[in-house]
Image (tube, grey):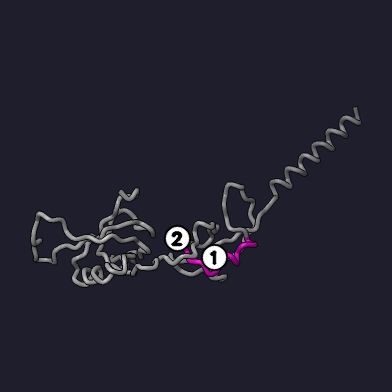
Amino acid sequence: MIALSLALIAAGGAGVTVLMLQVGHRTQVVTVVRDVQVGQVLTEQDLGRASISLDPAVKTVKADDLGSVVGKRAAVELKPGSLLTASQVTKDSLVKAGEQLVPIGLKPEQVPATELVPGQKVQLVHVPAQGETAKDSGTPPESIAGRVVKASKAAPGTGIVVVDIATSANDGPTVASWVSSSTLRLVLDAQDGS
């Protein structure tokens, strides 16, 4: 009886030890320590390390791989205290070869209720200037395809949101002239691109 009791105690102790080792297994991962805007190049000062108990389904960047993300661009806005994943960074420029970046200021009534996010497809539509009428109401207005690269927060007081739009290099000057003459409107494409 005593031998059986000792055996059960020993087995229970071994089981608790194994459980504690599994629960206590921690992984060193990369964290974000300060705000990083979309398109900004990551530096070592933007990143930190943390030791956490990690579920294998969570795909974070391991602390040993920190050097592999330094110098890449943030593909999304990064906030302090978050874990960094490989999908949040890119080696590519957010403006591709053959494209130009055009900033567009939108008044509060022109900003869609749907949040503008990087990569979202939009149409830049040319509308008549204030006080003018369309030349031919039977033809649709001229439009140019674009892609959101970044959208600012609404400016205090004015509520104006600046949206950086990537367009083809051929269309960039046209879009800039529409912005300058206040004859441009931004229309969101459907999420599936149709």
Query: Looking at the picture, how far across and down is residue 13, in whole percent?
Result: 80, 40
Query: Looking at the picture, how far across and down is residue 173, in whole percent?
Result: 26, 72
Would residue 133 appear left or right of 89 to someone viewing this image?
A: left
Q: Say the numbered circle drawn on residue 131.
A: none
Q: Nearer the viewer, mark 2 or mark 1?
A: 2
Give the CA separation, mark 2 to mark 1: 15 Å
Residue at the disc numbered 2: 76
- Dividing the picture into quadrants, the one containing residue 38 is bottom left
Mark 2 or mark 1: name the one nearer the start of the chain.
1
For the residue labelled by badge 1, is the local secondary structure a helix, a strand or a loop? Answer: loop
Would residue 29 appear left or right of 101 to someone viewing this image?
A: right
Q: Residues within 10 Å of mark 1 (few under 14, many from 20)?
A: some
Task: Inspect the magenta stretch and tell me whether residue 154 lies in it.
Answer: no
Looking at the image, which residue is at 84% across and 38% down?
10
In the rendered view of the protein, which quadrant contains the N terminus? top right
Closer to the camera in the image, 78 or 20:
78
Q: Magenta stretch?
A: 63-75
Residue at the disc numbered 1: 33
Query: Looking at the picture, how far across and down is residue 181, in whole percent?
Result: 18, 71
Looking at the image, which residue is at 25% across and 61% down?
144
Looking at the image, which residue is at 26% across and 58% down?
123
Query: Looking at the picture, how far across and down is residue 40, in whole percent?
Result: 46, 69
The answer to whether the residues at label 2 and label 1 have Cβ atoms under 8 Å apart is no
Looking at the image, which residue is at 64% across and 51% down?
53
For the residue labelled by badge 2, is the local secondary structure a helix, a strand or a loop? Answer: loop
